[in-house]
Amino acid sequence: MKPLFLSLLILSGLLEAAERPPVTHPRQTSGDTAVQPEWAETLTISVGNPGNANAALTGGDQRVIQAAIDHIARLGGGTVKILAGTYRLRNAVYLQSGVNLIGEGEKTVLIKEPSASTPLALDSDWYDQEITLSDASSFRVGDGVCLRSKDAKTGAATVLKRTLVARSGNRFKLDKPLRENLWQMNGATCATLFPILSGEFVADLRIENLVLDGNRAHNELLDGNYAGCVFLQDGNRITIRGIVARNYEGDGISWQICHDVLVENCRVENCKDLALHPGSGSQRPVIRNNTLSGCDIGIFFCWGVKFGLAADNTIEGNRLGISIGHRDTDNLVTGNTVRASRDHGVLFRPERGPGFAGHRNRIEANTFADNGRDGGAVVEIQGGTEAIGIRDNRFIESRPDITIASVRQGPETKDITVDGNILKGVGGAVKEKP
């Protein structure tokens, strides 16, 4: 048959397109990272505190963990086991592709050391790879630092993360050049702020069974676009399972432009900002069986988060339970218990207009208990948000003297379906007039 005629037959359904044969017995082939054999044993190295006879490498800070990760990464991947103990960090642990980081649960604690901050004593230009500090007494070679300034005219912020790699007095060399101006006239500062675990341009790894403590009482704020107990940027296929992320003066777990991230069976508590932050452009996140408490927002769908699942989580005692907004579309929120949110159980943000709103999201079969303020709503849908389904949820209000709507739609919202919900002490859905 002629190629054009074959194509017409396929399009018309008269002839099915051929499918590639499945891979049944893969061999390890050079350059093939998509299909690989399931090896019975892979490279594993253990780290522990000094005196731990079961550890291949011993130490009490990030350096021993980093040495193990880098060793395994050089050989193509495997697992670093962090044995029971406390590890005090003066810099982030930098993740690498194909290297799993596995602890021993509550017994393995990584804690951030207290932060220190000082103004720059001299200007540094965008081409420089060094800084001079006003007070260097709390800074050491090897420290992770955050360099910040704000343009005196425009208010634009500069935020850079670097490592101090050499010094002479209060003058430090950085691991990477600045590529931004850091001027005294713009209030340039240096602070020992960093994520506990940091992964940029990494893929195919697991983080499991660790306690990550941000030591919030002794650290400055660094928001989730740059840090958190876990911070990921430009990653793929990453699993975070069974960790405790607590006490960070910022986010608990933040991932930006990262695809196919699974966060399950984790506990995030007492973080300044967002418990879980599926960040800008992140596709297909799965957030399952987690407990998120005592933060500003439990789950914050950032910009353009699509085709995600948030299921069977307990989200309690936050300002907002779940926040959905800028082009966050086609996500399913189901089976969660959202309790004691001070403002709303779920907020659909107003954004800049209908073209920017979070459309085609489904809120189904959740339990909402004692969320929101008197006169407010449990689920608040603002702006030009469209095509939202609020189905088969349980809305419960047990607080005395609280009058609250189950769902409130803003005047510009469209195609909002509210169906099959059970209400106990909560009012029905309302739509505000233009």
Image: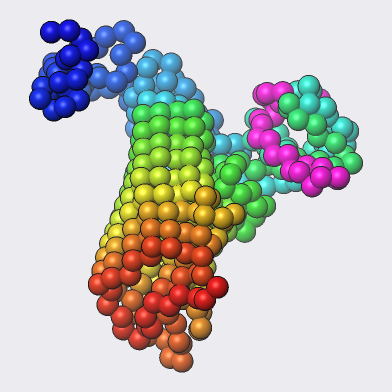
For the residue pair 91 and 380, the one nearer the viewer reads as 380
As drawn, 381 above or below 14: below
Say which quadrant the C terminus sits in.
Answer: bottom right
Q: For residue 333, what is the image quadrant? A: bottom left
The residue range painted magenta reads 148-177
Is 33 inside the magenta-drawn segment? no
Q: Residue at x 10, y 25 (%)?
A: 14
Q: Residue at x 20, y 17 (%)?
A: 7
Q: Is residue 165 left or right of residue 37?
A: right
- Relative to 12, does residue 115 appear above or below in the rendering? below
Residue at 52% x, 50% y is 355
Counting from the top left corner in percent of width and height, residue 204 is at 36, 29
Query: Is 362 left or right of 432, judged from the image as shown?
Result: left
Percent position of residue 408, x then y: 45, 73
Quadrant location, the N terminus? top left
Residue 161 is inside the magenta segment: yes
**Residue 392 located left or right of residue 59:** left
* Quarter of the view holding residue 208: top left
